Image (cartoon, rainbow, N blue to C red):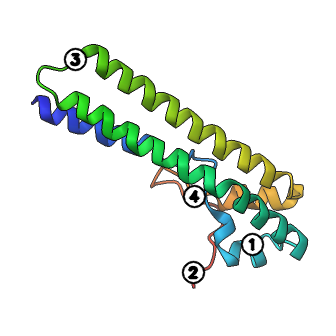
């Protein structure tokens, strides 16, 4: 029973570590970038520059989240559990996720500043939803 609880906590933690719902890697989809948003060459260049600027830090903060999740799981798997160490692992995971969310939000804000209102509204309609019953109002074409 205890193992099942630990596994449930770790799975929930892993799912929470994904990108916040308003953020998705739309810049990697050429159909979205070129056809649906109709980004100018200058906008495309600026978006690529922003992604390149943030990529190294994103790699680091995602690794920090993964390590913090492993550390927490390790602490939860000890028998007996050292509550102090487990709480420290929890706090470390919270801080790592916070840093990831902050970094993704800052990057998204910079990219938002490159879009006009119409492009932003289109992007919001295309945003994938977490609710499987709710569909985006527009679907990018698949290659």
* Disc with the residue nearer the chain's start (4 vs 1): 1
The CA distance from mark 4 to mark 2 is: 14 Å
Residue at (66% x, 64% y) in the render: 26
Which tag is nearer the camera, tag 1 or tag 3? Answer: 3
Percent from the top left, x then y, of residue 6? 21, 33
* Disc with the residue nearer the chain's start (1 vs 2): 1
- Vertical order, 48 against 6 (above or below): below
To which residue does mark 3 refer? Answer: 82
Q: Secondary structure at mark 4?
A: loop
To which residue does mark 4 refer? Answer: 128
- Vertical order, 107 against 31 (above or below): above
The CA distance from mark 1 to mark 3 is: 50 Å
* Disc with the residue nearer the chain's start (1 vs 3): 1
The CA distance from mark 3 to mark 2 is: 50 Å
Say which of 64 and 6 sits in front.
64
- Vertical order, 47 against 100 (above or below): below
The CA distance from mark 3 to mark 4 is: 40 Å
* Disc with the residue nearer the chain's start (4 vs 2): 4
To which residue does mark 2 refer? Answer: 142
């Amino acid at each position: 029973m205890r193992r099942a609880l630990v596994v449930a906590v770790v799975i929930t933690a892993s799912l929470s570590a994904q990108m916040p719902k308003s953020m998705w890697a739309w810049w990697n989809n050429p159909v979205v970038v070129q056809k649906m948003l109709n980004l100018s060459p200058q906008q495309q260049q600026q978006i690529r520059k922003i992604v390149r600027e943030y990529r190294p830090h994103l790699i680091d903060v995602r690794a920090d989240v993964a390590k913090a999740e492993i550390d927490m799981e390790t602490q939860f798997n000890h028998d007996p559990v050292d509550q102090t160490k487990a709480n420290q692992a929890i706090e470390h995971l919270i801080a790592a996720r916070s840093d990831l969310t902050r970094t993704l939000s800052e990057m998204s804000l910079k990219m938002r500043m490159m879009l006009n209102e119409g492009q932003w509204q289109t992007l919001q309609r295309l945003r994938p939803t977490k609710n499987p019953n709710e569909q985006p109002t527009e679907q990018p074409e698949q290659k």
